[in-house]
């Protein structure tokens, strides 16, 4: 679907490593916004808005975001089985990647490309007087949000990574890896700034949820605070989102097709289709849903371990997983997104957008934060049961904190399976990855929790050090 490029962007984000016949060299290239183009890009509100639009367009088109984040992480974890023979995907499903694997290239290159564009906008806006104060504040806040989002994914994929906040090559070309704790500080600072400066609605994108607002920043802050064990802040930010009238859970009667529909009230942030924003399908849908049903055409199936977690009444089992029997064998296909082509979208009458963040996660974040704090177990139980009730699953009356945390983790898996990287990141965050995956996969090694850094990045920057185990 996407052509793999042989031009590998190094951590400098302004150089490319070109693999030749037995040799490598660095070639300087013009960054996307050089001095002259930067002055032009931010010479007016209209051109500055175009620069930000380009940032969102880039994010909606890079493979790591359109489908690979969900595909890779679901295979690395225990949600998805791979049934075909692509060597890279076999490595992911067995956690058998090595330093020679190319699967690291897209996550590293794509996210750093987006970070470079965000930095160009942030720095460019601060160095020009061509844009109005209101637009400068709005666009800077949005770019900081995107930068924070990319860094969150980078550190949860690779561990320590270079913290690049500028576009000056002499300052960024040979940056070493920065400790995760320091990068989290930057993420929180960016999101705090964004939350303070963004609008309180989606007016900037004509009410389409492809833009971000202060509640989008609060939602990501809630997630980041959960990952850094700052539970009171996680609860507070999730509560802000849950209290907003902008959002509500999709009704149970619409759970099959409503949750991931364009501008669903459950969606906090979405991305438009990467080819044409009038299209009504996602690359995730076209990745997981076969165009015809035969044993050779089905590449993915939900794991038996996940399927057994759903009760008989749970609509997520029947509406978000499609059981297909071919030649006597039943395959359970991820079916959150229903459209795998424009003809399918036209036929269904439902336009689907890639849902980056949605309200259900905020209920589960607040439930876990409350349970870990321990002073509001009733509130944690209420949040958990809100998600279960919407799904048609039995509620629980657990009041022991440890038991409640286990139930929240299970609910997290059932609600957010095959969606972004929730399961994979949570297994690592809670320290369960080794025990859970080690029991399921004989090929699993603890070092597999992090992908290896791309070899081209290591060759380009002698100050980078490979992850342990590679």
Image: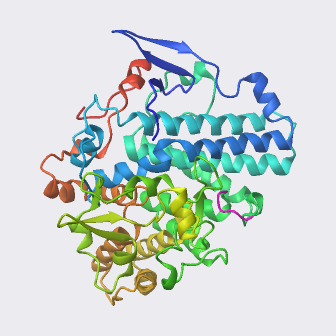
Q: Is residue 344 above or below residue 467?
A: below
Residue 412's place in the image compared with 20, above or below, is: below
Q: Is residue 255 left or right of residue 23?
A: right
The quarter holding residue 57 reads top right
Left or right of residue 45, residue 415 in this image: left
Q: Which segment did they paint magenta?
A: 207-211
Q: Position of residue 254 (x, y in %)?
A: 51, 80
Name the residue rendered at 27%, 57% in the picture. 294
Q: Quick one: 303 or 152, which is closer to the camera?
A: 303
**Image quadrant where residue 210 sits:** bottom right
**Magenta portion: prevailing SS class:** loop
In depth, the one of 93 and 248 nearer the eye is 93
Instruction: Give the quarter of the figure containing the N terminus.
Output: top left
316 is higher (above) or lower (below) than 253? above
293 to the left or right of 359: left
Q: Residue at x 40, y 38 (%)?
A: 160
Q: Residue furthest left?
A: 442
Left or right: residue 129 compared with residue 52:
right
Residue 81 magenta-drawn?
no
Whether 229 is drawn above or below 159: the answer is: below
Q: Nearer the viewer, residue 336 or 127?
A: 336
Number of marks = 0
Q: Quadrant of the C terminus?
A: top left
User: Could you tell me residue 214's position as x and y percent?
Assistant: 67, 62
């Amino acid at each position: 679907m996407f052509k793999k490029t042989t031009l590998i962007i190094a951590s400098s984000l302004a150089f490319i490593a070109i693999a030749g016949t037995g040799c490598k060299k660095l070639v300087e290239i013009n960054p996307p916004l050089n001095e002259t183009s930067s002055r032009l890009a931010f010479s007016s509100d209209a051109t500055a808005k175009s620069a930000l639009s380009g940032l969102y367009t880039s994010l909606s088109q890079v493979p790591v975001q359109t489908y690979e984040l969900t595909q890779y992480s679901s295979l690395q974890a225990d949600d998805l089985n791979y049934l075909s023979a692509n060597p890279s995907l076999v490595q992911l499903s067995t956690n058998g990647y090595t330093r020679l694997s190319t699967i690291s290239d897209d996550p590293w290159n794509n996210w750093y490309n987006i970070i470079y564009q965000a930095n160009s906008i942030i720095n460019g806006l601060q160095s020009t007087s061509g844009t109005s104060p209101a637009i400068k504040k709005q666009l800077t806040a949005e770019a900081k949000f995107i930068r924070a989002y990319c860094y969150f994914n980078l550190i949860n994929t690779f561990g320590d990574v270079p913290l690049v906040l500028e576009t000056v090559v002499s300052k960024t070309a040979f940056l070493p890896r920065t400790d995760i704790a320091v990068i989290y500080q930057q993420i929180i600072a960016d999101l705090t700034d964004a939350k303070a400066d963004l609008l309180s609605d989606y007016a900037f994108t004509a009410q389409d949820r492809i833009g971000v607002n202060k509640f989008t920043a609060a939602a990501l802050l809630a997630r980041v605070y959960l990952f850094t064990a700052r539970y009171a802040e996680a609860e507070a930010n999730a509560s802000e989102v849950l209290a907003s009238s902008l959002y509500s859970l999709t009704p149970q009667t619409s759970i099959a097709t409503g949750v991931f529909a364009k501008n669903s009230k459950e969606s906090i942030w979405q991305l438009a289709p990467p080819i044409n924003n009038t299209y009504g399908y996602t690359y995730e849908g076209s990745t997981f849903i076969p165009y015809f049903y035969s044993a050779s055409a089905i590449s993915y199936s939900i794991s038996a371990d996940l399927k057994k977690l759903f009760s008989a009444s749970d609509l997520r089992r029947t509406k978000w997983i499609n059981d297909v029997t071919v030649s006597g064998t039943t395959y359970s296909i991820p079916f959150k997104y229903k459209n795998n082509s424009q003809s399918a979208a036209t036929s269904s009458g439902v336009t689907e957008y890639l849902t980056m963040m949605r309200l259900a996660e905020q209920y589960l974040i607040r439930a876990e934060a409350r349970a870990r704090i321990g002073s509001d177990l009733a509130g944690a139980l209420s949040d958990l049961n809100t998600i279960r009730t919407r799904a048609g699953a039995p509620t629980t009356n657990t009041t022991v904190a440890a038991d409640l945390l286990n139930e929240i983790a299970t609910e997290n898996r059932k609600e957010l399976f095959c969606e972004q990287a929730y399961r994979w990141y949570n297994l690592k965050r809670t320290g369960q990855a080794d025990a859970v995956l080690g029991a399921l996969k004989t090929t699993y090694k603890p070092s597999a929790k992090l992908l290896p850094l791309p070899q081209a990045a290591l060759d380009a920057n002698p100050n980078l050090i490979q992850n342990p185990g590679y």
